[in-house]
Image (tube, rainbow, N blue to C red):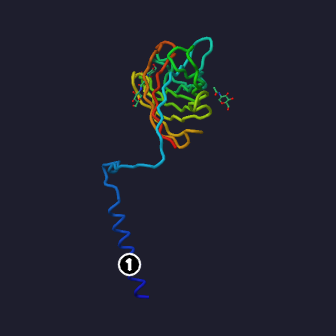
Amino acid sequence: MEGIRSILFLISCAFLTLCVTLSPVHGKYYSKTVPFVRMGEKVTNLHFFFHDTLVGKNPSAVLIAKASLPNNGTSPAPFGSLYAIDDPLTTGPELTSEVVGSAQGLWVSSAQGLQTSLVAYFDFGFTTGEFNGSSISVFSRNPVLETERELAVVGGRGKFKMARGFSELKTYFVDPTTGNAIVEYNVTVIHY
Ligand SMILES: *[C@@H]1O[C@H](CO)[C@@H](O)[C@H](O)[C@H]1NC(C)=O
Ligand SMILES: *[C@@H]1O[C@H](CO)[C@@H](O)[C@H](O)[C@H]1NC(C)=O
Ligand SMILES: *[C@@H]1O[C@H](CO)[C@@H](O)[C@H](O)[C@H]1NC(C)=O
């Protein structure tokens, strides 16, 4: 009995020591960065153009809700505007180039003040080639006024199951009055 007690005592001491050692130091919100490698993972690069048309004969981005705030600025999408999209993805910057899929989802104008910034909730589905039927999920801030920006890839379907990655964006064209834009996407996806 005494033996068991001392073993329990030793275990709780070890546990306490561990807890004290692992408890976070206040003032730092991240741990040390160490290498992390998983076997069997592959990397694929995707390159295409995204056409977001708010105003035109066939809009592919439509306003579905907006906040009742005064629009003091000139932004076509002031803070609190929510759009549903079904945007074509093409190999070249012209809408007439080959369509390889579509981006479906939502974006919301998410910054207070006059500097437009969005948060994107998109599923990029592909309809041609090796990735026909597969898609990647993007959920990220999208500071559209910066010509070059980065969006997080947080998952995927089909061949992109368990995907993670990032997408480098470059604005190819934007009409500040309508908000119509063509954006070059260069996506790096790590998947199985
Ligand atoms: C917008 O205009 C309203 C009413 O004039 C004002 O109360 C508000 O502070 C303005 N907001 C900004 C971001 O300028
Ligand atoms: C993509 O997949 C769908 C469904 O399997 C098929 O009907 C279609 O023909 C495929 N398209 C191409 C271009 O391979
Ligand atoms: C896309 O990104 C990859 C990796 O960052 C880079 O090697 C490649 O040159 C880029 N391609 C284009 C067309 O920007």
Residue 113, quarter of picture: top left
Percent across and percent down for residue 20 are 33, 64
Residue 43: x and y in percent read 46, 38
Compared with 190, 39 (above or below) is below
Ligand 2 quadrant in view = top right
Quadrant of the drawing holding the N terminus:
bottom left
Q: Which residue is mark 1?
A: 9
Q: Is residue 133 left or right of residue 24?
A: right
Which is nearer the eye, 39 or 80? 39
- Depth check: give the residue in front, 171 or 77: 171
Left or right, 121 with respect to 151, comes to right
Q: Is mark 1 within 8 Å of ligand 3?
A: no
Q: Amino acid at mark 1?
A: Phe
In the image, is residue 23 above or below residue 124? below
Residue positioned 62% across, 14% down in the render: 58
Estimate the x, y position of residue 150 in percent, counting from the top left.
42, 30
Quadrant for residue 114, please give it.
Answer: top left
Q: Residue furthest bottom?
A: 1
Please tell me how crowded label 1 is: few (under 14), some (14-19), or many (20+) other residues with Cα within 10 Å. Answer: few
Residue in front for this viewpoint, 93 or 143? 93
Q: How many marks?
A: 1
- Residue pictured at 55% horizontal, 16% vertical: 97
Q: Is residue 182 above or below residue 133?
A: above
Q: Residue at x 38, y 82 (%)?
A: 6
The kind of secondary structure element at disc 1 is: helix
